[in-house]
Image (cartoon, grey):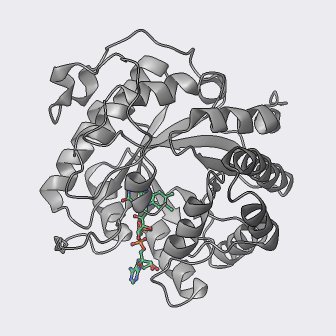
Amino acid sequence: MADTKLADTQQPAASQAKPQEPAADKAAGSAATANAKAPAQASTQRATQHRDHVPVFSLEVFPPKRNAAVGTIYDTLDGLQGVDPDFISVTYGTGKQSDRTATARICNTIRQEYDIPVIAHLTAQYLDEQGAAEALEMFEQAKVRGVLALRGDAVPGREPAGVFDHASDLVAFIRRTHPDLTIYGACYPEGHPQSVSLKQDVENLRTKVDAGVSHLISQLFYDNADFLNFVQMARAEGIDVPIEAGIMPVMNVGQVRRMGKLCGARIPHTLDRMLDKWQDDPRSLRAAGIVYASQQISDLVAQGVQGVHLYTMNHPGITRRIWQNVGDLFEVKEQTA
Ligand code: FAD
């Protein structure tokens, strides 16, 4: 997902007081020490009992902004009760204001207090090798299941470190320094906005996978045909790792139009009509958005995708309603010998 979402869609600070993460846990390198509150949710059955099933269902959350109450993440995580993901991934902020330790701390909270496996995102273009090594050390302490290795987006006024020019450089670094860590990568069903063509982007993706990626998660898209076409192209290029489809529920008109511009996500006719009809009626648009995302997911599962990654945007209510619609499609069937 484009980094801008980290800034644009942050929920306001929670009105009620929530348990704070302990002060000691805020320091870099102490990510594995948090234990502020008793587990709110039993361990996810899918994740702990069946490691190798398909389709996978996972969620993405992002750390609260620096000036937001840190406890808002508990609103999100508590609100996800009843949803049964294989793992939750936690984004990494690239902006100047971003807290370098937030991703590791939240990963640790999710794993330790909610007993759900976690994936940490890491963007690398502003890091040197020492910075990347420190981040990976924090993730190791937080006992993450894997790292989503990213280049990241350019931040105006910030000069890249010039060490990790592409995500594949970070992938190779992790493979060399942490051979046991599972490495995830991002992919773009409609092509990355900076690539000349989808074909070229898929060729670059092959380089990234060859460097050591074992699982891909896609950018959001609104037309399943784009994702299915992309998967075919990736397979033809020799990319044979699992590819999870990234789904972002429609929450408001501005969000969809912005994502269209930022990520190049095409807005199909049906979605365009929804946006027009309910542009001044947020409640109806949100309800239609839940149906739209649920239908996308149901169709993708019917088409045999290997996984669905839901961008929660830290809106647990919407995530829960989608899970109520599609959760049964992810039920893990008993393995027969
Ligand atoms: P790359 O894989 O490096 O690709 C970027 C561009 O370079 C592409 O056009 C590609 O074709 C080209 N390229 C790649 N390798 C080569 C090569 N060897 N030679 C020439 N060209 C090459 N951003 C955040 O800031 N924080 C997050 O937590 C975050 N999470 C994300 C999660 C997902 C699932 C996705 C899809 C995106 C996420 N993003 C996040 C956004 C991401 O950082 C941007 O999309 C960024 O512009 C590209 O990152 P990348 O890792 O895909 O880059």
Q: Is residue 141 left or right of residue 153?
A: left
User: Which residue is pictured at 54% across the width and 66% down the height?
Assistant: 259
- Judging depth in this view, the residue of 117 and 192 nearest the camera is 192
Residue 73 position by quadrant: top left
Question: Which residue shows up at 40% across the image and 24% down it?
Answer: 15
Which residue occupies 18% across, 75% down? 162
Location of residue 11 (image quadrant): top left
Q: In this image, 26 relative to 176: left or right?
A: left
- 207 w.r.t. 214: above or below: below
Rendered view: 115 above or below 98: above
Q: Is residue 206 visible?
A: no
The location of residue 75, given as percent across then percent down, is 47, 26
- Residue 50: x and y in percent read 66, 30
Q: Residue furthest front?
A: 280
Q: How many marks?
A: 0
Compared with 147, 216 (above or below) is: below
Please state the quadrant of the image where ligand 1 appears.
bottom left
Residue 171 point in image, percent of width and height = 36, 62
Picture quarter containing residue 168?
Answer: bottom left
Residue 165 on image: x %, y %: 28, 75
Q: Is residue 77 left or right of residue 93?
A: right
State the residue in front, 255 or 29: 255
Above or below residue 35? Residue 83 is below
Q: Is residue 258 visible?
A: yes
